[in-house]
Image (tube, rainbow, N blue to C red):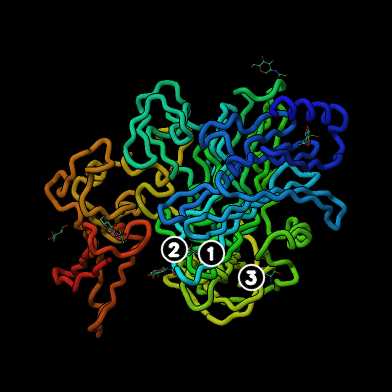
């Protein structure tokens, strides 16, 4: 099979390389096949996964070995027992070909499997269009079962491009954060010298000559390369041409382009894994405390489109150029006409005729920075929008100079508008808005705690410190006397830690395996002291009441990732105590 495909592609490229020719779509008893002049791919009917992918004859995937050497393919944490990869049992396949209204031909492979024990339908769509070197993907989950109306939460729903080749050299969150992959990469199945410190997190500091260790950190975890959805547009894998690429030493890129975000959940603050050796499209997860929907009778949602883009540059082409090439596709307007033309093949996809626009001019409070407007499920905090699995979400930066904001291609419906900005406490909320859609743009960063955005000074790639596994920073070394912050004199980036520890060390702390309650000077680690001066004769004259506001960005308790209270877990009901001038307030119990 392999030999056959590469032979036919060599023949094609030799004859018609610069001009787009016909699109080929065919099927055998083992696989389904799609190809245009440059991109060739096939889906195996025994696994439900793409098992072959070449660009200009270069194999981008490697050979299938268990779960490696596949993709993009669908998997989920959605059946009663947990993880499931559809396609190997009871799957039905469909091959589609057509020509869109612009005259471009396209082909599509559809895999659908009904998971027998529950009746859940899992579907994956891959579209290849002539003139493009990427795959448009949609993924669908449907569940109709009145007698058992509830299965579980949809804890993960994702497509993975999971290569099994030495070709790829770099992991790219975006053009501003990227680095060499560990060599070998434990997250992509490579062993080598690595000590597991906790789930999917390794200490690699004993390796010699590993470019990741030299340039980034001793610690490697899939979370280091994660991203926040607000400004995320494309992430991926880069091949610098030094490892097994084609004879001309070309560079290659594999990118997940988030051209639409409307079918994800959690709004702009959703953060998730994007690349660790595997390239991900995380449509749903409970990572980082993200909300997940329940799978109940009537659940029927199609996620996407997203676009897996593959590109190639002449030897020495920098990664940034290949990222820029991918970024041109990262808007909901791109290919909207094509999606309209294929909408009849994709259940639940909302064509342009079902969309409108929304505009507003918002008067922003003084000092508002990076203001954002979000449209999402009506009546709830946008972070909880997984409650309504028919609701979509949109956001856009507000022009800070005049407060204007607009969104296009919004699915017709009723939305909550939420406006927030850096430097302004709280949200502005307005329900029952009938409105529209948009895309995202880039933003600045602020550094307001130790180990936040500050660049790690000790490695040449200078990753922002928050990206590195927490075990790299020793709280007792950083704060021998605990956190004592004096407003006006202390500096946030030095004197305010990024985590308020209750205790420090123990499980998953490679350097400090024994848990400490006290700092090196004997003070309690969990006791943070904040002081400030007041000129009481002027400021407090005639005042008998004052308000102190304490905000938590997030808390880790027994509720864990799922955010579901479990009374039998240890460390539930975490008391957070605030004492003012020695008077302790009633503790806030965090479930
Ligand atoms: C599919 O098309 C490719 C390229 O033309 C060809 O090599 C292959 O034999 C075809 N397979 C089937 C099953 O027709
Ligand atoms: C509904 O769910 C139950 C329990 O999982 C299962 O036994 C039954 O076969 C399902 N019904 C259908 C129509 O799939
Ligand atoms: C490709 O790289 C190899 C090894 O670095 C080098 O010998 C060769 O000249 C390069 N080929 C081209 C076409 O650049
Ligand atoms: C899922 O169901 C559980 C149990 O009924 C409920 O507590 C939770 O709020 C539901 N979650 C969502 C997102 O609807
Ligand atoms: C707001 O200002 C931007 C330039 O900063 C301009 O492009 C836009 O047209 C203005 N919008 C309104 C409604 O005044
Ligand atoms: C916390 O530390 C401060 C000094 O920084 C001390 O005055 C206070 O008594 C401590 N509180 C507790 C509960 O240990
Ligand atoms: C609650 O936690 C206990 C202990 O970890 C676990 O055995 C149990 O399955 C959990 N229950 C739920 C509903 O998650």
In percent of width and height, residue 96 lies at 76, 51
Q: Residues within 10 Å of mark 2 (few under 14, many from 20)?
A: some
Alpha-carbon distance for marks 2 and 1? 9 Å
Residue visible at 83% across and 27% down in the picture: 11
| Sequence-wise first label, 3 or 2 | 2
Nearest the viewer among 590 and 455 is: 590
162 over 377 or under it: above or below: above
- On the question of residue 420 being in view, the answer is no
Q: Name the residue beneath numbered marker 1.
A: 143
Q: Residues within 10 Å of mark 1 (few under 14, many from 20)?
A: many
467 over 341 or under it: above or below: above
Taking the image as four quarters, which one is ligand 3 found in? top right
Residue visible at 46% across and 53% down in the picture: 77
Asked if marks 2 and 1 touch (Cβ < 8 Å), the reply is yes
Q: Name the residue beneath numbered marker 3.
A: 405
Label 1 secondary element: strand
């Amino acid at each position: 099979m392999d030999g056959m495909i590469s032979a036919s592609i060599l023949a094609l490229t030799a004859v018609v390389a610069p001009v787009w020719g016909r699109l080929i779509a065919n099927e055998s008893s083992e696989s389904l096949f799609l190809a245009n002049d440059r991109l060739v791919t096939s889906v195996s009917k025994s696994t439900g996964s793409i098992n072959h992918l070449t660009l200009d004859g270069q194999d981008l995937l490697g050979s299938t070995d268990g779960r490696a050497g596949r993709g993009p393919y669908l998997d989920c944490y959605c059946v009663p027992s947990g993880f499931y990869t559809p396609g190997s049992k009871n799957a039905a396949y469909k091959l589609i070909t057509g020509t869109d209204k612009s005259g471009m031909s396209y082909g599509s492979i559809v895999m659908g499997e009904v998971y027998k024990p529950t009746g859940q339908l899992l579907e994956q769509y891959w579209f290849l269009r002539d003139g493009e070197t990427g795959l448009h993907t949609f993924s669908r989950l449907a569940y109709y079962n009145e007698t058992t109306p509830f299965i579980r939460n949809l804890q993960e729903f994702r497509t993975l491009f999971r290569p099994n080749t030495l070709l790829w050299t770099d992991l790219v969150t975006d053009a501003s954060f990227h680095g060499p992959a560990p060599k070998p990469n434990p997250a992509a199945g490579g062993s080598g010298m690595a000590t597991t410190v906790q789930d999917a997190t390794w200490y690699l500091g004993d390796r010699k000559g590993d470019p990741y260790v030299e340039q980034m950190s001793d610690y490697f975890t899939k979370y280091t390369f994660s991203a926040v959805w607000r400004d995320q547009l494309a992430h991926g894998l880069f091949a610098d041409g030094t490892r097994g690429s084609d004879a001309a030493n070309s560079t290659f890129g594999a990118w997940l382009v988030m051209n639409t975000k409307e079918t994800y959940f959690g709004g702009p603050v959703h953060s998730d894994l994007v690349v660790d050796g595997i390239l991900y499209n995380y449509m749903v997860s409970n990572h980082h405390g993200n909300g997940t929907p329940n799978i109940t009778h009537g659940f029927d949602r199609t996620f996407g489109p997203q676009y897996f883009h593959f590109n190639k540059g002449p030897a020495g082409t920098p990664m940034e150029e290949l990222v820029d090439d991918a970024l041109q596709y990262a808007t909901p307007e791109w290919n909207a006409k094509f999606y309209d033309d294929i909408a009849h093949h994709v259940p639940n996809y909302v064509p342009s005729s079902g969309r409108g626009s929304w505009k507003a001019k918002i008067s922003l409070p003084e000092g508002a920075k990076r203001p954002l407007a979000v449209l999402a499920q009506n009546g709830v905090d946008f972070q909880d929008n997984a409650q309504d699995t028919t609701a979509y979400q949109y956001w856009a930066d507000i022009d800070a100079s005049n407060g204007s904001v607009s969104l296009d291609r919004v699915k017709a419906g009723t939305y909550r508008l939420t406006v927030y900005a850096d430097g302004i406490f709280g949200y502005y909320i307005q329900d029952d808005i009938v409105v529209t859609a948009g895309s995202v743009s880039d933003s600045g960063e602020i550094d307001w705690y130790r180990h936040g955005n500050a660049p790690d000074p000790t490695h040449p790639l200078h990753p922002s410190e928050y990206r590195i596994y927490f075990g790299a920073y020793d709280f007792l070394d950083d704060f021998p006397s605990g956190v004592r912050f004096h407003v006006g004199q202390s500096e946030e980036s030095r004197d305010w830690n990024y985590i308020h520890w209750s205790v420090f060390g123990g499980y998953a702390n490679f350097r400090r395996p024994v848990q400490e309650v006290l700092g090196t000077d004997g003070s309690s680690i969990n006791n943070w002291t904040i002081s400030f001066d007041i000129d009481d004769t002027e400021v407090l004259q005639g005042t008998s009441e004052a308000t102190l506001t304490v905000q938590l960005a997030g808390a880790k308790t027994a509720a864990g990732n799922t955010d579901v209270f479990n009374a039998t877990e240890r460390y539930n009901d975490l008391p957070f105590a605030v004492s003012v001038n020695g008077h302790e307030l009633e503790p806030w119990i965090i479930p």
